Structures are given as structure tokens and as C-alpha cells.
Image (cartoon, grey):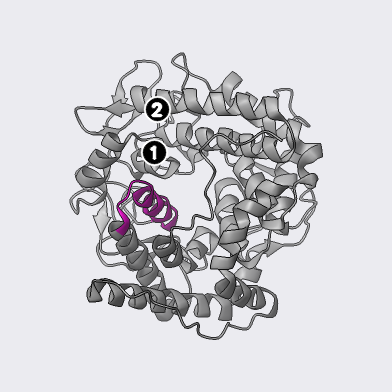
Amino acid sequence: MNYMRNTLGPRLRLLTVPMIALTLALWTGVAPAAQTIPVTPSKSTKATNNRAAAYVLQNQLQQLMAKAGYWRQIVRKPNGQLRHEYLIPGASYFELFDWDTYFMGVALSYAHHGKALEGSVRDFLHFTNCRWAYRGYTPRAIDGQQLWALPEMCKPFLAQMALRASLTMHHVAWLKPYYKRLADTLWYWHSARSAPDGLFTWFDGVESGVDNNPAVSSAPADRTEGVDLACYIYREYLAMADLAVLLHKPADVQRYQQLAGQLKHLIQTRLWDARAGTFYNRDSRTGQFIRVPEWTNLVPLWAHVATPQQAHSLITRYVLNPHQFWTPFGIRSLAPNTPWYHPVHGYWQGPIWIVSDYMVMHGLLNYGYTAAAQRLATNTVATLLADIKKTGGLHETYNPNTGQGQNQGSFKSWDLLGAYMVQEAYTGHDAAGIRAQPLPEH
């Protein structure tokens, strides 16, 4: 367990004040008192002022979220076949969803609350290898009374969930009975969704979570090699390696690190279009790129698998380009130079999503574009703060032209990450981070 203490110790000392304040808010429903954020003197007065202003916005957003009880509204008690406390995207939901759960668990780690994320993992893995003949299959959504989304697979975030829950709670013993099933979920991707070139395919857009992504074919299904999918599985390998360290399984550490290295190479070579200077999905049947400028092409920045040269091209030509993804309110989900672009009613075809803002922000940090990451974090927090002040709630998506909230207004889910984005952008802390370097064997 030394790895947990060594990894978390400096981070906990750095984040003590906001963690304590939000822990109290989580359990009492009382907004924490306004925090005084220390500002380190800088050569640039403008940079110092920007930092101070960004923290003020974040603190205001934290206050309003806590006052409204958002943290309590995403935790549900055991319900029917969901036997453990679990996470939901908002008070109106009863379903357990895959990647929403992971990012909510990341947000809750600041309040030292890992029990609901642990329970969510237990509930998902309860249905792995139990009711279907195919090894490793796990439904991507479950409610208390029925399974949802068959035959779509749970997105590859379960190992990342298990790691985040273990680090938050400072113990990993709870996972021992589930470790085999967790490994089987990755076996499923290899056996059922692997393409001839070694990459992996989404069954359809809904399974990918980017429901109407024009770069993922739903008809026919099971043919799109996803850039995002490969990156999520890469992170799953790293998370499994970390968990294997904690569970004293040195052979598994080496195996998962090797798999991660092999997949990283495939992403860099098979999914990179050198002419366009970006990653693209591929059609597994034709081998051709699916040249759609979707935000999912940027996920290799978050996963830290892009080479420095690839990252420079992605960031300068696409991320920071106002004619592609950059807006004053966040990152567009689809570049506007496509026939599918609909910024108001497009769902994933143009509107801003906080989860992609969060990923891109950390992608910018990964490759040294710190000032841009800080601007993106500040813009995102300002968008959320304006929404909650105006409407009393948060929305699922945001208009890239106006910043106005769109779709349902009772959304929580990964919008809660906004409470920490400024902090992470300025300190470099990554609550969703996974060690990408070889880990010592115990």
C-alpha cells in the first residue's frame, strides 16, 4: 500500500482546504465558506490577475453547487438489482451509466467519497459473466429493475473506476473478489471487438457514448475503429497495471504494460492521418479513414498517447483554432465545417460538453500548453457559473455561440468536474490521472 500513500500524500496536502470544505458540504448540505486562494507572485501581473479571477469563478461555482446539494443528488441507495450505493447523473435518474460514473467518481474524490464509486463498480461487475454465455460482457447501463442497452458493452472505464475508488478510499482489498471479472471485461474487447489490425470497434454510436457521432457507423454496426475507444482501452491497461501493483500481481503488471505499449503504437501509426494532421476513426472493413472532425479525435491528448509532433499539430491546427473546436465557452463537439454541424439541436454534433472540455484541458497540460489549458478551464467554469446563476441548474450541453445551456436542465454528472477545473489547470493536479511509467513490483 506504499504506492497509495506515496501517490496521494502530496496531492492531499495540496488540496486540503477545498477537500475539507466540500466534504462538509457533501454531508451537511451547507455551502462551504468562501476560500481565500493564495496567489503566487508572477512576473506577469496580467497572469496573476487571471489566476485570481479564475479561482474566484471556481469558488463561486463550488458554493452554488454545494448550496444546491448537487453532491448528494448523484448518490443513490441500493435499489433492486443494484445492490450497492451507486452514482447517477442527477436526481431524476435511477440508472447506473458507465463513463458518467467514472467522471462523477473523479469529482467525488475531492470530498474523500469513494464508497459510491466502489459500489457502482461492484454493481457493474455483478452482471459480468453471470447471465450471458459470452465471457466479459457487461451492460453499459443498468437500473434497479432491468438491464439497459443490450447488446452494447460497458465502455472501457471499469478498471479506471476501480483504481479511482481504491485511491480515494486508500484500500484495494474490496476488489480482490472482482479482479478476475474486471480482467474479463478487457478480454471481451479482445475477443468480440478486435479488428484485424489489432485495434477495436464500437458496436454503434450509442455504445460509444457520443450517441449521434457521424464518425461512428451504426448501420452496419461493429465496424468503426474508434480513436476514443483505443485510448480508453489504453488507459484501462494502465489502470489494470496499477491495480496489479496494489494486489501484488507482478506478472499482470508486466502484461498490461506491454499491452498498453503495443496499443499506443497502433494509435500513433494506424489512426493518424499525417496529411490532415489529426487522428481519425477507421472503417475496419475498408481500412479507410472516416474523416469527420469530431472531438473524439482529440482524446489521444488526454490519454497522452500522441507523439509531441502529433500533439502540436492537433493543438495548433484544431484545438486552438476558432474555426474548428475552440470557442469562448468551451470546446465544440464537432467542427463547424461539416454538413452535420448543428450547434443548437445537434446533441454531440456541435454543442459543448463538459466532459470533452475536461479531457482537452488535461490534454493541453500533458503537452505543455499550460496557458491554453488555463483559459479553457476558466471559460468552462464561467459557462457553468453563468448557467447556474441564470437558471438555477446545469445543462447537459452548451451552445458554442452563446454559452447558453441546452437539453435538460437538471443535469449533474461530469458537469461537477467544473468545480475543480481551474484548480487542476493551475496546479497541474489530475484527479483522473494514471501512472504511465513502469511501476515497481512488490
From what the image shows, is residue 373 above or below residue 91? Answer: above
Question: Relative to the observer, which residue lies in front, 252 or 140?
Answer: 252
Q: Position of residue 269 (x, y in %)?
A: 34, 23
Label pair 2/1, CB-CB below 8 angstroms: yes
Please tell me whether residue 170 is drawn above or below residue 122 in the rendered image: below
Residue 12 location, quadrant: bottom right
The residue under label 1 is 300
Q: Residues within 10 Å of mark 1 (few under 14, many from 20)?
A: many
Q: Position of residue 319 (x, y in %)?
A: 27, 48
Which one is in front, 433 or 88? 433
Q: Nearer the viewer, residue 192 or 271?
A: 271
**Along the line of sight, the residue nearer the viewer: 218 or 413:** 413
Q: Residue at x 40, y 19 (%)?
A: 284
Percent position (x, y) of residue 315? 26, 45
Specify the amino acid type for callout 2: Ile
Q: Secondary structure at mark 1?
A: helix
**Which quarter of the image is occupied by the C terminus?**
top right
Label at residue 267: 2
Earlier-in-chain disc, 2 versus 1: 2
- Left or right, 328 with respect to 302, comes to left
Q: Which residues are magenta?
A: 353-370
Mark 2 residue crowding within 10 angstroms, few (<14) / some (14–19) / many (20+) = many
Q: Secondary structure at mark 2?
A: helix
Q: Is residue 40 magenta?
A: no
Q: Residue at x 54, y 44 (%)?
A: 434
Instruction: Indicate the position of residue 131 as horizontal and vertical percent values.
Output: 77, 31
User: Is any atom of residue 86 visible in this view?
Assistant: no
